[in-house]
């Protein structure tokens, strides 16, 4: 901890909560000052959020605004409204280009604004066309980087797509674009002028201010905090439907759900009681979900910060949203009320130490590099208020409905976004973007159902320990009860030997074993095992006896296993690399009748009291023994093997 953090933590709880609230308020007030126009349209550095997207090294996702417009639409007027909106925002006239060895934002004075009109047979065909257009990669050096399309289904039914790369647009920017498009379309239709004040600053102004406001000493101080804060953090191993690959993948999809209003109302009330924010309650619930699934008490997640603390950028289009890091402590089985307080403190500290570009944060923290994961965190949870998301806007004579924009990439394993609805007591919309190489849609639905269940339970009893919170619904419990029984399948009264000999008779030339590229058929393997079984019987091996196998992983190993079973005995694996004393101890405990070994394992079996047969020395003798199947010497209830694990100190495990 830093000295300031220690002093804050030492304050009485109520004073600490009030202090952190005032600190946040002061930080917001200070942050609103100082942002001015740079006075030119020359190249500017990337913003922190843009640097983060490039640093994470994934395909640049789109932020599509897709609308269904039903009514008498004037396509020419819509194109003019789009052109007027583009003229207002430098972000929509920006490309990313190399300047002086670094990527920079380059703003064009004007850009061509095309709105091609395409005919579609029906709404399904129109949506498929939108899907294909949105799947195309962005050319970040093209002017403009975004693309627009208008698809006519009927004379009074259209789909409108405005797809922008995430480098120049975030979710709140889409709301700005929608409102301004509607204002310009209405004004052009009525012959008037939209009531839109000229922006005092542009997105590149914000990027320049962000780049210049922190000196090297500030960056070092903030970096030192995060290095200390994230020291020793565990990797969040959240259960996936498929194993994680060796490298990161970005194939993604999005699923949408709802969260009930009653639980959200209780979340708001709990936040007021502990002087926290509803955001803190919702994040604490999410951390409880991760804890339940992963078993970890120490969780590191990402959470989007909109970074629109300046009033002057509230209506500016650009990529302001950047992830911040939250490390939550769930140790000691705290009550939910206590966890909310912990999350509130962590969130306040993250605000206090904001401003470090994500690539610099990763450089400061220096986490273990894992090519299959994004650095620092892999799961993101965010909350937005209704007025920061796409806001419905009116077009004269047009009924507008939002289409769910297609998603083909996922920057992280999962990104949750909870959007509060504006109506009092209303629920929330929950969108989850997820990596389809890791998760199935059915699993995402289960996670969100359990999140809603936990939010309901935790806010209803905030003073109960987390471990007592009910997560499963009655439907979940019924499913688990049924699944626990599993399908009932009759077990055949057979043995390994009987099944193997039947397969050998059915497909004698089929490949049974491949060793170093050399194939051995069932008939040959069966004959080898029969001869070795005869040798074992000659050494006094009877049904129920135990035979040690100290062999390399070559053809002799499966041959020996089958031979032991054909003799009605159980085999005991012996590691050729183990000390001779350990091997002798196992041999004595298992009461081995005989040991089969290779010559190079002679040292390992040198202290064994039982007879040792070196297979390398009996090849000729084996060749002269009968290779026909012996009578079955063991039944289904016979012991197949006894195994001693590396930690065994007593008797082995019998199978």
Image: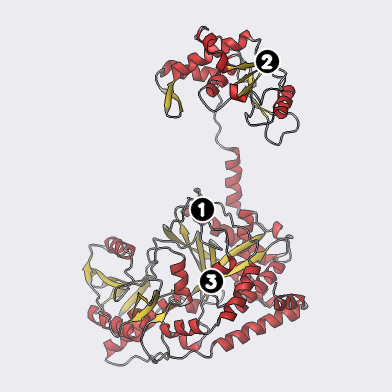
Are discs 2 and 3 less than 8 Å apart at CB?
no
What residue lies at 71% left-to-right and 82% top-to-bottom?
18
Image quadrant where one finds the C terminus: top right
Q: Tell me the crowding category of disc 2: few under 14, some 14 to 19, or many 20 or more residues within 10 angstroms, Cα based.
A: some
Residue 133 percent location from the top left of the image? 30, 65
Residue linked to disc 2: 611
Question: Is 49 placed left or right of 181 in the picture?
Answer: right
Image quadrant where one finds the N terminus: bottom right
What residue lies at 57% left-to-right and 64% top-to-bottom?
366
Marking on residue 443 = 1
| Residue toward you, 479 or 135 | 135
Give SS at disc 3: helix
Residue 500 percent location from the top left of the image? 50, 20
Q: Earlier in the sequence, mark 2 or mark 3?
A: 3
Give SS at disc 1: helix
Where is 163 relative to 547, above or below? Answer: below
Marking on residue 360 = 3
| Residue toward you, 273 or 425 | 273
Are discs 1 and 3 less than 8 Å apart at CB?
no
Give SS at disc 2: loop
Mark 1 vs mark 3, foreground winner is 3
Q: Tell me the crowding category of disc 1: few under 14, some 14 to 19, or many 20 or more residues within 10 angstroms, Cα based.
A: few
Residue 587 percent location from the top left of the image? 71, 23
Where is 46 relative to 406, above or below? Answer: below
Residue 365 percent location from the top left of the image? 59, 66
Q: Is residue 495 visible?
A: no
Q: Is residue 199 visible?
A: yes
């Amino acid at each position: 901890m830093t000295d300031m953090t220690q002093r804050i933590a030492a304050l009485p709880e109520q004073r600490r909560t009030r202090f952190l609230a005032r600190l946040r308020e002061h930080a917001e007030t200070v942050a609103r000052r100082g942002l001015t126009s740079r006075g030119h349209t020359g190249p500017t550095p990337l913003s922190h959020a843009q640097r983060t997207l490039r640093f994470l090294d994934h395909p640049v996702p789109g932020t599509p605004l897709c609308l269904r417009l039903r009514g008498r639409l004037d396509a020419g007027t819509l194109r003019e409204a789009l052109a007027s909106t583009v003229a207002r925002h430098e972000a929509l006239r920006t490309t990313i280009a190399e300047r002086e060895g670094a990527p920079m934002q380059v703003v064009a004075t004007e850009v061509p604004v095309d709105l091609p009109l395409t005919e579609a047979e029906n709404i399904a065909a129109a949506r498929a066309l939108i899907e294909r257009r949105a799947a195309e990669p962005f050319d970040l050096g093209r002017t403009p980087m975004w693309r627009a399309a208008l698809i006519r289904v009927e004379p009074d039914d259209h789909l409108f797509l405005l797809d922008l790369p995430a480098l120049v647009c975030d979710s709140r920017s889409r709301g700005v674009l929608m409102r301004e498009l509607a204002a310009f379309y209405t004004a052009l239709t009525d012959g008037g002028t939209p009531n839109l004040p000229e922006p005092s600053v542009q997105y590149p102004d914000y990027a320049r201010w962000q780049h210049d406001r922190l000196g090297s000493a500030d960056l070092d101080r903030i970096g030192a905090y995060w290095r200390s804060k994230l020291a020793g953090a565990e990797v969040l191993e959240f259960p996936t439907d498929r194993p994680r690959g060796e490298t990161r993948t970005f194939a993604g999809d999005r699923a949408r759900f709802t969260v009930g209003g009653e639980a959200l109302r209780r979340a708001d009330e709990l936040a007021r009681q502990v002087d926290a924010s509803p955001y803190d309650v919702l994040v604490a619930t999410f951390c409880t979900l991760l804890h339940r699934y992963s078993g970890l008490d120490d969780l590191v997640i990402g959470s989007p910060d909109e970074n629109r603390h300046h009033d002057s950028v509230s209506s500016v289009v650009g990529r302001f949203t950047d992830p911040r890091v939250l490390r939550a402590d769930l140790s000691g089985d705290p009550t939910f009320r206590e966890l909310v307080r912990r999350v509130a403190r962590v969130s306040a500290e993250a605000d206090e130490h904001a401003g470090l570009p994500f690539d610099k944060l990763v450089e400061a923290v220096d986490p273990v590099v894992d090519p299959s994961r994004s650095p620092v965190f892999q799961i993101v949870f965010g909350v937005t208020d209704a007025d920061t998301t796409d806001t419905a806007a009116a077009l004269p004579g047009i009924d507008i409905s939002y289409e769910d924009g297609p998603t083909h990439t996922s920057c992280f394993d999962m990104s949750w976004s909870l959007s509060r609805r504006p109506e009092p007591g209303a629920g929330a919309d929950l969108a989850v973007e997820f990596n389809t190489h890791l998760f199935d849609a059915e699993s995402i639905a289960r996670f969100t159902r359990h999140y809603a269940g936990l939010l309901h339970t935790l806010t209803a009893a905030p003073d109960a320990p987390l471990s007592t919170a009910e997560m499963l619904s009655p439907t979940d419990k019924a499913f688990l009860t049924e699944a626990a029984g599993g399908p009932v399948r009759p077990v055949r009264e057979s043995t390994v030997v009987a099944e193997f000999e039947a397969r050998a008779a059915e497909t004698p030339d089929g490949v049974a074993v491949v060793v170093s590229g050399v194939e051995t058929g069932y008939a040959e393997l069966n004959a080898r095992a029969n001869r070795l079984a005869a040798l074992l019987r000659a050494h006094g091996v009877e049904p129920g006896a135990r035979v040690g196998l100290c062999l390399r992983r070559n053809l002799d190993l499966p041959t020996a296993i089958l031979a032991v079973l054909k003799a009605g005995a159980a085999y005991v694996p012996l590691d050729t690399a183990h000390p001779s004393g350990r091997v002798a101890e196992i041999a004595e405990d298992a009461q081995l009748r005989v040991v089969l070994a290779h010559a190079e394992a002679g040292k390992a079996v040198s202290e064994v009291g039982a007879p040792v047969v070196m297979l390398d020395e009996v090849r000729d003798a084996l060749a002269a023994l009968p290779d026909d199947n012996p009578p079955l010497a063991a039944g289904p209830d016979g012991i197949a093997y006894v195994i001693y694990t590396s930690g065994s100190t007593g008797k082995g495990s019998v199978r």
